[in-house]
Amino acid sequence: MHPLNLCIDLGNTTGKAAFFRQQKMLEYHEQLSEKSILHLVQKEQPHYIIISSVRSNLDNLLDQLKQYSKVVVLDSTLPVPMINHYETPHTLGTDRIAGVVGARVLYPQDSCLVIDAGTCITYDFIDQQNNYFGGSISLGLQMRFKALHHYTDRLPLIEAATTRPALVGTSTPKAMLSGVINGLVAEIEGVIAGYSEIFGNFAPILCGGDAAFFESKIKESIFVASNLILIGLNRILIYNVENKLKS
């Protein structure tokens, strides 16, 4: 039987995780604390674990996990199944790395543009030959609403509407909704168009916490892969197991 892999994506407060055998996802868990992650590992005792994290200190968690499994931490030094042309690889977010690797798992014959709509919106492109050069980073949906409120005296803090607002806002809240949501939709569509002019055909893939919000608002056909980061982490883990950990 193929080994049981656990892939963990740790955010600032909680984490997501999934168990895999080869490329097949078996279980998905979200809103995980370090304590609940440890409980999962104690219960299932996976052969291998890979972690992508935005946290600076993982020492305590890693020490505990290593009692049960072989643990890999995704950072700029870990080999990955792509050719990384990023000029500052040590500053490249591990979620961006995992995203483009996951995209190539889902679309092995295509170039891919990964649009991760989370706290920030990141755009990352990988071509058919697994060449990754970079992309762009922009303010996310909630960050834009908070910035309008925080950096002005009179603009309220509002929440995103579930439907796309009218272009012409007839009140201040409606104008803010139009500016943020229509502006972001125009940005996403414009970036897709710009990449199309340069690279021709590719698969646009949307992930991140706000992916479902934007899916119905974008004109272009776009594939939503909510677990893209975890899929990419699993591929990176398999790549390292096959090439290093068993040697």
Image: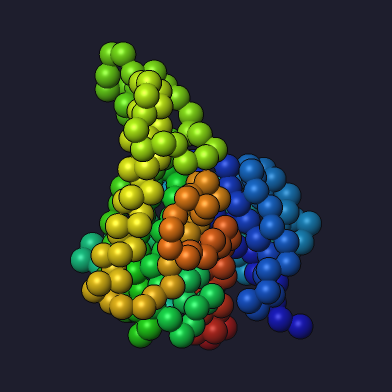
Q: The N terminus is located in which quarter?
A: bottom right
Residue 63 seen from this side: no
Q: Of residues 81 and 138, which is closer to you in this image?
A: 138
Residue at horizontal 65%, vertical 48%?
30
The image quarter containing residue 65 is bottom right
The image quarter containing residue 7 is bottom right
Furthest residue toward left: 87
Q: Position of 68 compared to 178: left or right?
A: right
Q: Is residue 24 above or below residue 212?
A: below
Furthest residue toward top: 154
Residue 213 in the image: x percent, y percent?
A: 52, 46
Residue at horizontal 54%, vertical 61%?
224
Count the marks: how many?
0
Residue 45 in the image: x percent, y percent?
A: 73, 63
User: What's the colour scheme?
Assistant: rainbow
Q: Position of 50 compared to 191: left or right?
A: right
Furthest residue toward right: 43
Q: Is residue 36 above or below residue 133?
A: above
Q: Position of 217 compared to 91: left or right?
A: right
Residue 86 in the image: x percent, y percent?
A: 25, 67
The image quarter containing residue 83 is bottom left
Q: Of residues 239 and 77, which is closer to you in this image?
A: 239
Q: Is residue 8 above or below residue 81?
A: above
Q: Of residues 131 and 187, which is closer to you in this image?
A: 187
Residue at horizontal 34%, vertical 69%?
125
Residue 150 in the image: x percent, y percent?
A: 32, 22
Residue at horizontal 57%, vertical 42%?
14
